[in-house]
Image: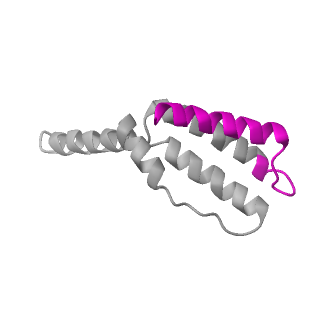
Amino acid sequence: MKKLLPAVVIAGMLLAGCAGSPRMSVEESCKFLQGDTFKPTGNQQQQADQIAKHYQEVADKVAQDVADPIQKMADIMKKVASTSLGTKSSEQTAELAKQNNRIGEVCK
């Protein structure tokens, strides 16, 4: 049993390390966002779904200061993608703009 213990400890440390990837700094996040060239394809509904997934992926790795508004944008786009046409309401468009402006404030 003593020979197995180090392997178990190492495996546990590897799993724990992968579970919570470190987030980028604010500076790294802003630079990443400025260089993001994601382009959705397909019809409006497919594009909304792709955008929601992209926003979610980005929110999971950028600094918390910009992740919060991006997460809200992902949630909005998930709702948009769940509609039959994949179109945004005027309220959703306004909320997306508001969250985008919040990101702009952080990334001045």
Which stretch appears magenta? 80-108
Against 78, residue 23 (above or below) is: above
Q: Residue at x 61, y 52 (%)?
A: 53
Give 105 or 13, whichever is nearer the viewer: 105
Question: Does residue 64 appear to the left or right of 87 in the view shown?
Answer: left
Give 96 or 53, whichever is nearer the viewer: 96
Location of residue 42 by image quarter:
bottom right
Camera sees residue 22: no
Q: Position of residue 55 (x, y in %)?
A: 58, 48
- Residue 83 in the magenta stretch? The answer is yes
Query: Outermost residue, bottom direction?
Result: 42
Location of residue 19 by image quarter:
top left
Q: Position of residue 57 (x, y in %)?
A: 52, 49
Q: How many marks?
A: 0
The type of colouring in the image is: one colour
Against 33, residue 68 (above or below) is: above
Query: Outermost residue, right direction?
Result: 84
Q: Quadrant of the N terminus?
A: top left
Question: Does residue 55 appear to the left or right of 8 in the view shown?
Answer: right
Magenta region's main secondary structure? Answer: helix
- Residue 32 in the magenta stretch? The answer is no
Give 49 or 97, whichever is nearer the viewer: 97
Camera sees residue 106: yes
Location of residue 18 by image quarter:
top left
Q: Position of residue 72 (x, y in %)?
A: 64, 36
Question: Does residue 74 appear to the left or right of 86 in the view shown?
Answer: left
Q: Residue at x 52, y 41 (%)?
A: 59
Q: Position of residue 25 (x, y in %)?
A: 35, 36
Q: Residue at x 50, y 35 (%)?
A: 66
Give 59 or 90, whichever is nearer the viewer: 90
Q: Residue at x 67, y 68 (%)?
A: 41
Query: Outermost residue, front direction?
Result: 108
